[in-house]
Image (spheres, rainbow, N blue to C red):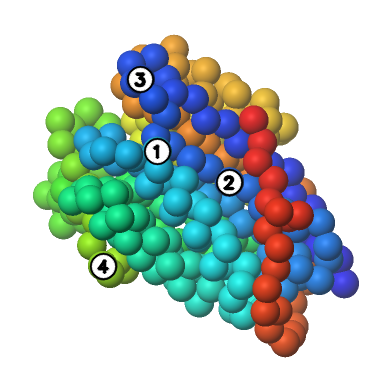
């Protein structure tokens, strides 16, 4: 049995208007085949809430806890592991807020697990996950914002979101309450698919069809991530900018359920790219 061949890259920049970077991202592509078959690869972007104190700490804590919880889950239980990892991240940020005596401490969290021929995602907040296939970009996530809720109710057209004054007012986030319900979904992958995770500092100034066109023109994820970030900077994005680009070169066969691995040392399998 082979594992999927995946090429990926991540970038994060403070931007031109913010004093600090409150975004975090992480890429984990395990080197050993048993771990990769049992758990797959994991990618995530988190955007600390800019209006709150210590947003950078919140996003970093969420990412750290999320990855640890996921890779200590049960083999081949991808959706279940993602959901439990989100709950662990939420609790960790919530408890951190109590420790720091900060009434409001929070972050978004959008993550993708790629295992065999399946993509499973978990999402809270207004970072986004795009699937680019056949020269078309599809947003796989719903913005958990007041504006996103208006779109879901068909009160507001989706093309009005990027310029709406209340675009960044979150209605759901990690760490701002004791419990949170992530959106979790799964879909089949195809060879040649491109997945893009990005904070709102990126997607707010880049249209969906531009994601598709650039992903189609630029095959290397490192080059693609650089071009997307540069494009957002040139358009005067008013926020931090973070992005992870993933290209599926070829797919693996489905995994069989195997006994639970009790503990996985993350120091050897986590990889962060710049």
Where is residue 156? Give x, y as percent.
15, 44
* Residue 130 visible in this rendered orientation of the protein: no
The residue drawn where x is 53% and y is 73% is 81
- Secondary structure under tag 1 reads helix
- The image's mark for residue 178 is 4
Quadrant for residue 10, please give it: top right
Where is residue 94? Give x, y as percent.
30, 59
Earlier-in-chain disc, 1 versus 4: 1
- Secondary structure under tag 2 reads strand
Q: Which of labels 2 and 3 is toward the front?
A: 3
- Secondary structure under tag 4 reads loop
- Foreground pick, 211 / 76: 76
Q: Which residue is mark 3?
A: 19
Q: Quadrant of the N terminus?
A: bottom right
Q: Which of labels 2 and 1 is toward the front?
A: 1
- Foreground pick, 230 / 265: 265
The residue drawn where x is 62% and y is 80% is 74
Earlier-in-chain disc, 4 versus 2: 2
Inter-mark Cα distance, 4 to 3:
29 Å
Q: Residues within 10 Å of mark 2 (few under 14, many from 20)?
A: many
Q: Are marks 1 and 3 in contact (CB under 8 Å)?
A: no
- The image's mark for residue 26 is 2
Inter-mark Cα distance, 4 to 2:
24 Å
Inter-mark Cα distance, 1 to 3:
12 Å
Residue at the limit of the structure toward the right, as seen here? 1
Q: Which residue is mark 1?
A: 56
Q: Are marks 2 and 3 in contact (CB under 8 Å)?
A: no
């Amino acid at each position: 049995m082979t594992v999927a061949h995946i090429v990926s890259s991540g970038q994060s920049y403070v931007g031109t208007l913010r004093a600090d970077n409150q975004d975090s991202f992480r890429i984990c592509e395990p080197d050993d085949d048993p771990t990769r078959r049992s758990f797959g690869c994991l990618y995530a972007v988190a955007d600390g809430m800019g209006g709150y104190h210590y947003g950078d700490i919140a996003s970093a804590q969420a990412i750290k806890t999320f990855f640890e919880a996921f890779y200590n889950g049960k083999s081949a239980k991808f959706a279940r592991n993602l959901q439990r990892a989100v709950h662990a991240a939420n609790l960790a940020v919530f408890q951190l807020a109590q420790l720091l005596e900060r009434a409001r401490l929070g972050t978004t969290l959008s993550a993708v697990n790629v295992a065999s021929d399946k993509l499973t995602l978990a999402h809270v907040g207004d970072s986004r996950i795009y699937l680019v296939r056949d020269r078309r970009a599809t947003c796989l996530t719903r913005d958990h914002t007041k504006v996103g809720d208006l779109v879901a109710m068909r009160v507001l057209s989706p093309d009005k979101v990027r310029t709406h004054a209340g675009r960044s007012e979150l209605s759901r986030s990690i760490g701002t309450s004791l419990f949170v319900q992530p959106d979790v979904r799964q879909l089949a992958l195809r060879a040649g698919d491109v997945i893009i995770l990005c904070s709102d500092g990126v997607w707010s100034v880049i249209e969906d069809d531009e994601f598709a066109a650039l992903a189609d023109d630029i095959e290397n994820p490192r080059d693609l991530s650089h071009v997307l970030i540069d494009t957002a900077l040139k358009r005067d994005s008013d926020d931090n900018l973070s992005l992870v680009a993933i290209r599926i070169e070829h797919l693996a066969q489905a995994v069989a359920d195997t006994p639970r691995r009790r503990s996985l040392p993350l120091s050897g399998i986590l990889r962060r790219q710049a």
